[in-house]
Amino acid sequence: MALDKNQIAQRIAQELEHNTYVNLGIGIPTLVANYIPKGIDIEFQSENGVLGMGPFPYAGDEDPDLINAGKQTITTLDGAVLFDSATSFAMIRGQHVQLTVLGAMEVSENGDIANWKIPGKMVKGMGGAMDLVASADNIIVAMMHTNRAGESKILKQCTLPITGVNCVKKVVTDLAVLEVTKKGFKLLERAPGVSVEEIKNVTDAKLIIEGEILEMIL
Amino acid sequence: MINKTVDNIEKALEGVESNMTFMFGGFGLSGIPENAIASLSQKEIFGLTCISNNAGVDDFGLGLLLKRKQIKKMISSYVGENAEFERQMLSGELEVDLIPQGSLAERCRAGGAGIPAFFTPAGYGTEVAQGKEMREYNGKPHILETALTADFAFVKAWKGDAAGNLVFKGTARNFNPLMAMAGKITIAEVEELLPVGELDPNQIHTPGIFIQRIFQGEKYEKRIEQRTVRIKE
């Protein structure tokens, strides 16, 4: 069975390290906050200017002056801090935020990512994505393995305008966990009940497969 | 104390003309200068270049200026919430310069800080880097980005005083302090205008030196774009 979006987030949450600052992108990455393992302390940064972001407010407590980068109403936790956009991106570009999790339309085997533009169709802008991928030490992509047309999003080379070069470290899809190595995508884990063969069949890029590939444990 | 107070929005907007460059603080609809935008959208000024992280929604924020076709060019990082914007952009009526959000913030900050340009890793290897100088530092490629300034910068704060000192609330701070620095004339609208001495100098976010005019805004709508809540267990 392929993973659903929540399960992708759940698997990515296993990558979180204790006492780190993390920026979660819009979509599946946002869900990662729901699965922080016990004993792991994380502070979430949102690039519009908050560190120490908490869950959504209770109905009636929404504050228009307190939103995340997805423009959703949020809360802050004890120890939170608010700042301007230049300070926020100083945290990001200056590599003070250790991990970025974001969605993608395509990832290539050298770690390029495309997630901001479909020429002639979707031109919404890159927001903070280019700054985030240009700098973070660790970048994990959360996405479906294929697009709506069933085509692989794991590619030899990106076909869409790229957001950043040579930056993605790991990809977690509904089918697999992949590591971006100097030699290309290495298959680390497969979704429960999904065979290596099935993954190969829907992957455009060449996969490095060494030894037995275990199922993800959720 | 240099008094920056103006009595009303009309006095605050004195000198705005067609073909000028304006900056607008705000992220999405949070922290936007609602009074200034509403008033500008009533004026017969056109051909504007607007620098703002977003472009409002169809019937609020900068969407009001777009609807009247007052804007010639937008410089933004993300414009996904505005159908009229998309229509004007795809038809070629509106010129759009999309730039990474961190570069936008830093370009405004640099503009106000007397730094004409800087190198950043953001955008290297992408469309954004086209035509820009590239240089390696510490083995990593960077691109040259230039500072931004504006004829007028419009910012919105929670509290302010007659000296132009500003305090922001929550994530409504965002681009406001940076654009405040980058305006040749910066106009601050505040929810609460206090007499000098009321704000604690230790707690001021934007020093009044960056502000030329300040007034108390009215009827803040503060629209929420994505109302997300959790259920009480």
Image: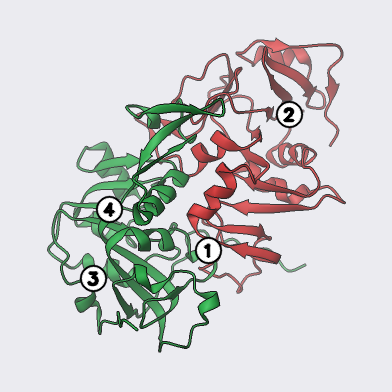
Chain colours: A red, B green
Q: Report if the CB atoms under discs 1 and 2 are less than 8 Å apart.
A: no
The residue lying at 68 percent from left, 47 percent from top is A22
Q: Say whether residue B68 is left or right of residue B53.
A: left
Q: Which chain hosts label 3?
A: B
> Nearer the N terminus, badge 3 or badge 1?
3
Determine if marks 1 and 2 fall on one subunit. no
Query: Which circle's residue, 4 or 1, is located before the other in the chain?
Result: 4
| Residue type indicated by callout 3 | Ser
Residue A203 relative to residue B148: left or right: right
Give the number of the disc on residue B171.
Answer: 1
Residue carrying label 2: A2
Secondary structure, mark 1, is helix
The residue wearing badge 3 is B39
Q: Tag 4: residue type?
A: Cys
The Cα atoms of the two marked residues, 4 and 2, are separated by 46 Å
User: Can residue B229 be seen in this snapshot?
Assistant: no
- Where disc 3 sits, the SS reads helix
Give the vertical position of B93 relative to A216 (above or below): below
Which one is closest to the eye, mark 3 or mark 1? 1
Helix, strand or loop status at disc 4: strand
Q: Are marks 3 and 1 in contact (CB under 8 Å)?
A: no
Q: Residue at x 86, y 11 (%)?
A: A211
Residue A84 tag number: none
Which quadrant of the figure has residue B130? top left
Q: Do callouts 3 and 1 point to residues on the same chain? A: yes
Mark linked to residue B50? 4
Expressed as whole percent of the image width and height from the top left, the position of residue B113 reads 38, 55
On whether disc 3 and disc 2 are found on a single subunit, the reply is: no
